[in-house]
Amino acid sequence: MSSERIFVGWETSFCQDLPATLERVYEEKMNAVIAPLFHPRFKRDDALISDARDGPQTRSDLVLDSRGWTSSVVGNISKWIRPDAQCPRARLASEKAFKQEVAWATHLSVPAVLLPTPTPRCANYARLVNQSATQAQYLQFWVRVPLTTRSRESVSLAEDDTEDLPSPWEAWNTLRTMCQYHPKVSVALEITADLPSNEELQRWLGEPVRAVLIPTDVFLTNRKGYPTLSQRHQRFFLDLFKYNIQYYLTGRPRHGGGKFLPYVQYLHFLYSKRPGMDSKSLFEAPYLDYLQAPLQPLMDNLESQTYETFEQDNFKYDQYEKAIVKALAATPEDKESVVMVVGAGRGPLVRCALRAAVTANRKTRMYAVEKNPNAVITLRNLKISEKWDNVKIIASDMRHWAAHEKADIMVSELLGSFGDNELSPECLDGAQAFLKEDGVSIPCKYTSFMAPIMSSKLWNDVKALDGLKHFETPYVVRLHNIYSIAPSQPCFVFEHPKFDIPRIDNRRFLEMTFTAEESAVVHGFAGYFDSVLYEDVTLSIHPPTHSDGMFSWFPIYFPLREPVSVAKGEEMHVSFWRMVSSTKVWYEWSMTTRDGRAATTLHNPNGRSYWIGL
Amino acid sequence: MSSERIFVGWETSFCQDLPATLERVYEEKMNAVIAPLFHPRFKRDDALISDARDGPQTRSDLVLDSRGWTSSVVGNISKWIRPDAQCPRARLASEKAFKQEVAWATHLSVPAVLLPTPTPRCANYARLVNQSATQAQYLQFWVRVPLTTRSRESVSLAEDDTEDLPSPWEAWNTLRTMCQYHPKVSVALEITADLPSNEELQRWLGEPVRAVLIPTDVFLTNRKGYPTLSQRHQRFFLDLFKYNIQYYLTGRPRHGGGKFLPYVQYLHFLYSKRPGMDSKSLFEAPYLDYLQAPLQPLMDNLESQTYETFEQDNFKYDQYEKAIVKALAATPEDKESVVMVVGAGRGPLVRCALRAAVTANRKTRMYAVEKNPNAVITLRNLKISEKWDNVKIIASDMRHWAAHEKADIMVSELLGSFGDNELSPECLDGAQAFLKEDGVSIPCKYTSFMAPIMSSKLWNDVKALDGLKHFETPYVVRLHNIYSIAPSQPCFVFEHPKFDIPRIDNRRFLEMTFTAEESAVVHGFAGYFDSVLYEDVTLSIHPPTHSDGMFSWFPIYFPLREPVSVAKGEEMHVSFWRMVSSTKVWYEWSMTTRDGRAATTLHNPNGRSYWIGL
């Protein structure tokens, strides 16, 4: 999501002349202003929109054209509004003013309104926000949340003393849970001079943060008198820069002679220091947090474009080539090995094997087995154009091919994001019928991994698809706006070949226990895999060991129908099943917390919503 | 949909070396090629994709990268394929080849395949096309249809003699009706030397024509030896240029020394002669055939942006100003008239009235009545900034305002695309309580108009919305890819004021009889209105009298749940109801053909799917 520039604006608590304020904002190289929609001292009574009142209640919409409102102004909802006040009169006046301000913001077509910080007891506030967000077509609702409670600039809705408040995240979590993670309700994160723990900072990266508010008194002064941020602040900003966020300075300028420009320039300077985009990042950029249905490689045929994309993953094929070289080098020098590529596609592994045979200096006979008749056309053309004289093309499903001889080395690339989820186990079990007893499978082992994650973005995207089915389906997705609540753990393991087992059973069950590193909401589970191709040659998309620059696989996301809140240190017991019938394979999953405080339903029983066809 | 250039390509029936063919196509300034996917002489037997066959069945997908396939190649399905052949063996071989070619096209990611011309008896062909189109994710299916039967280049699937065939449109209509107007199945219209009647040509403008095939022998030779088209051909092309269509030359070059370039240049030259885009066309361009839900102006408040757009319709406000000038000029010179703008919005009609008072040289007292509290804020600001000293702003619903005095002239702009559909009748009936007995309403009369139309585009867009509700809802839409099957007829009429009627009844019922000018399919009805503001000052969106340059209203489209085929000369009896309850207004509609051959269900009974809230 990184673009060339960041979007910087100014939050002002008072704005007499909006066009003049915008002039100043543009002069100081900023893009927009967060301004009050109504005069801050204009605390209205019950007769808010009375017919009797003759003067206008606020400035005219005509001071800007609609393009100006849409691109350059965010509305600041009045801070005096207290929808959860004890006094019924104050409460009703607050509700009326809130609705009037949101109606006016809608009329103006401003992109968003900035809402005051919630307190933990904010039911009526949440009801108002949820009602407005549900009615709104385009308007976004940014909830101001400070990083720590004692922020000087933060404004509270509560009448209580702020001493007793839990963390600002808890209040936000209460509000958005009451709004059922409404996709229009997001966070305007207010930076504070003191920063909370790194774990708490990381947690914000799993939240829908749309804006960051930066009080000018958070900045330090460098030796030349210019504003700068502490090292920890800088590191947090470098994390934030990965997301599509707008940055707003708040308060009065304290450096550079009453100008904002030095702050703006500093933010752009900091942004320019973020790590550059390598080719993997560029490839992944359009897919960040984008849900894709997993492939059905047995039931469907891949398209030319799909082959073309994955054939460009040089790291992956280099590893395969190394693995085949090692496997061939382990054979006697004078032996002619039979190498079979099962699931040859358009031939990249055949090329790896041919190159490996040259490097290892071994004679080989090869077979390329492929069930997709379109890919077979490509293979047959390649056999002619690239002179694959020792390669036989076999148009067949590897599970059913009646081979005339057996392989010494069987090479395949059948893994999915969760390892076994594209049915590599079932395919290789079938193909092992034509692997010699002492034959080698490349890969020989793969392990899936799993971690509970928070991501209202992903959960809302699943919800938008509508229907139970979608909450019981895993998605291939380049995880981005997420927080990993606990370290990942290994899940299912498969090894090939399996000659010593009388009846191979590819069903699996595992209960994993995770411990929450911070209070958070579990929106589902992230899945990964790592794989041993041959001896020390591996492939991995598991974050701690991710193969450098490899882009063929994104992680997988298993959603939960209802998110589960967990407290810091709380245990999560996650059950995962891999089920097999004669026609299909599927997963089921569920989660409970300690002492059964919360238990999810079983997801995808009998594969009713999602399965992979055999 | 007009863009700067047209997309021109070449259809070839034989293509040995695709990259070389594309080289030539680019050299001759063309964009793409329609080429056979399999060798035309390669008439395959039942063992099409046999394991035994060792050589590739067609060229490799690797001759182009996927971008090349996607942007520059359309696949030509083999013309020997006859899915409706009598002989079962030929039939099954055809089916198998058809599926193989479509699978290969899908594998290549070409944007479309060109299908052979259907015959009227094409059930098995239609089944195959429908099956493929339903399975396809991106692939489009272009059905080759010549303008007239005796086209030299046209190829037929039938084994019969072509003498007995009905018009090519009939065969296309049969095929696409069997495919239930599938949005992926469209027309590649083959131009013929002889053109059918103008009415038949117009009918194609209501069909989903995606490509036009132009045999080179259709061109005439001008005095300098260059290709040119007949006047009638030119006029038809100028019509076609309004749509998003690709143009493909077919056959061998007959002019300019074996080059296609002169043809390509002629087509670009002809395109450059199309009428330019005026500001109305530019405004409308993004909305062509785009379905919009009609406004609910009483229940919802318009937004600032919406006001801003409509306030720019100078023609409309000029007409209002003229009407008010005439109405004021008809009053005694020394009289101070009371002018009330009911539904004043952000004040454009107030400005018209103020200017008119100056032009007519009359004294006035004015009232601006508006129910939207956001627009009232604008009006109150305008009263100050523009010194509207004789204008009172009234924040009230005109139906309920307790006025202290009555108006001489009441001005409103409450009309919808179908005249009364935004409840102008009900609003003005309420407001007439404060209009003098001899007072004037501007507008004083409006009439809706209706015509049956063919447009599988619009019908499919409604179908994509899913659910009965959407087929019983009218849509505001800038009609574009439609054919008007019969001339429009007046529908409902409303006049204001109505002092002489004891109890005003705004219900209406009308049965209209239309006669089809050509065989066609009724996909619904187009609605329009015209309106008398005052005496000879009018506003109209009814095509025969459309006000020049006015863009405030698009037509309305009432869909039919099931399209109805009608023969040339057949009568269509269309019933339309306007129904009123204490809380809402709605329309119901239905159609029968002569002798009840076809009758639709009643649409929207009791306003179950669509209504306008009072």
Image (cartoon, coloured by chain):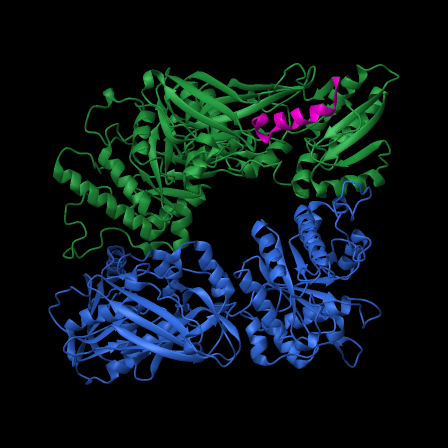
Chain colours: A green, B blue
> Going by the image, does A333 lie left or right of B337?
right
Q: Is residue A415 visible?
A: no
- Percent from the top left, x then y, of residue B498? 19, 78
Residue placed most toward the observer, A176 or A43: A176
Please tell me whether residue B53 is drawn above or below residue B610 in the rendered image.
Answer: above
Residue B16 inside the magenta-drawn segment: no
Q: Residue at x 17, y 42 (%)?
A: A93
Q: Is residue A31 left or right of residue A583?
A: left
In terms of image quadrants, where is residue A372?
top right
Q: Is residue A435 magenta?
A: yes
For the point 15% across and 77% down, the residue is B436
Task: Give the total of numbered labels.
Answer: 0
Question: Residue A591, relative to residue A82: is it above or below?
Answer: above
Residue interval drawn in magenta = A418-437
The main secondary structure of the magenta stretch is helix
Q: Position of residue A46 (x, y in %)?
A: 14, 46
For image coordinates 18% across by 49% down, the residue present is A48
Q: In which image quadrant can residue A245 be found?
A: top left
* Residue A529 in view here: yes
Image coordinates for residue B177, horizontal then vertical, percent? 54, 64
**Residue B371 horizontal/vertical position (percent):** 22, 60
Residue drawn at (68%, 38%) of the image: A307
In front: A181, or B198? B198
- Farthest-out residue, left: B404
Q: Locate the C terminus of chain A and report the quarter of the image it occupies.
A: top right
